[in-house]
Image: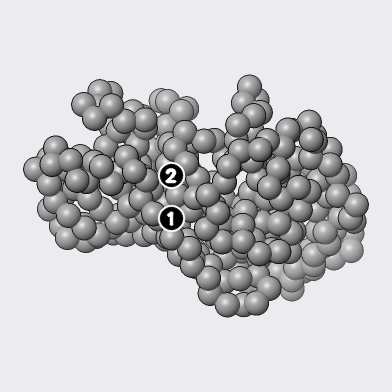
Amino acid sequence: MDYEEKDTQAVLQIFEVSSAYDGIRLDKFLAVIYPELSRSYFQKLIKSGKILLNDSPPKSSDPVKENDLVSVQIPPAVKVNILAEDIPLDILYEDEELLIVNKPKGMVVHPAPGNYTGTLVNAVMHHCKNHLSGINGEIRPGIVHRIDKDTTGSLVICKTDTAHMKIAKQMKDHSVTRCYRGIIHGCIKEDSGTIRTTIGRDPKNRKKMGANVRNGKPAVTHYRVLERFLKHSYVEFKLETGRTHQIRVHMASIGHPLLGDPLYGPSKCSFHLQGQCLHAMTLGLIHPTTGEYIESSAPLPTYFQELLASGKL
């Protein structure tokens, strides 16, 4: 089953520029308003006439000014040959607007070149049929945020474009509750703390992210020790921002990488784990239609529980 183009018009929104964005480039302003979309994507929309600045066709480099009006047309999703696959989903919450699932270990969130099957998107397309938001592009329907392949836990899927935009704004405003659990190397001294750095692509290894690298974006992680073992610690993390590999990078930056993390920790792991020991436990947000706060919690996976009870940490 293909993901079909929806029989809808482009989503039109009009934004009034506040003083906080006075003077910045139009494409940068749009990337801030829509954090799940890239500046290059908006540069293409601007060239195709989908963006207007005060009712006139602009250039990507044009600066926006306070009280300017920016009209944005997000095109509907297009047809793409991504298979809907009957893959079981562990559903934590569902209604007509949202789906919150407990992603298993080893599952990639969305298709990418060379990996178009077996992803969460393939499973969600089968479950939701064609009822998914199309804002994030043809190979990522419904996806407003993601977690790493080997990280388990709570992830929200948006079924409508309106829900997508409202949840994306909450993500941008850092108002979504995202609490993780992880096992780290070493016995961290402090009972709790906050790590504040920038995070960006590691210039020496494009597969990695780095703390305090040039042109990095601000990243804030709050942590609290739940239990200390002989050589490891069980920790709760609360994200204030959501940068790529944020918890993994932050814990490695203070000398306590996640257990089983082959990219930021020791290359060998005596526990024979499949990637980092990290679980997105709690996800809380304001429902896009009702305005009520909803929260879902994914139980710790079996391997994680067995590690905590093993007496070998």
Q: Earlier in the sequence, mark 2 or mark 1?
A: 2
User: Residue 8, position in %: x, y?
Assistant: 89, 55
Q: Is residue 210 visible?
A: yes
The residue positioned 42% from the left and 52% from the top of the image is 280
Q: Amino acid at mark 2?
A: Thr
User: Residue 225, position in %: x, y?
Assistant: 21, 57
Residue 70 in the image: above or below residue 292: above
Quick one: 267 or 304, which is closer to the camera?
Answer: 304
Give the left or right position of residue 148, taking residue 79 as reference.
Answer: left
The residue positioned 50% from the left and 45% from the top of the image is 103
Quick one: 72 or 163, which is closer to the camera?
Answer: 163
Contact between labelled residues 1 and 2, with CB atoms less than 8 Å apart? yes
The C terminus lies in which quarter of the figure? Answer: top left
Quadrant in which residue 16 is drawn: bottom right
The N terminus lies in which quarter of the figure? Answer: top right
Q: CA distance from mark 2 to mark 1?
A: 9 Å
Residue 10 in the image: above or below residue 65: above
Give the left or right position of residue 155, taking residue 234 as reference.
Answer: right
Quick one: 253 or 283, which is closer to the camera?
Answer: 283
Where does label 2 land, which residue? 152
The residue positioned 82% from the left and 59% from the top of the image is 11
User: Residue 218, position in %: x, y?
Assistant: 43, 53
Q: For the view shown, which residue lies furthest in the left direction?
A: 230
Give the left or right position of residue 211, taking residue 271 as reference.
Answer: right
Where does label 1 land, which residue? 298
Give the left or right position of residue 140, taking residue 49 as reference.
Answer: left
User: Residue 150, position in %: x, y?
Assistant: 43, 36
Determine crowd level at label 1: few under 14, some 14-19, many 20+ residues with C-alpha closer than 10 A: many
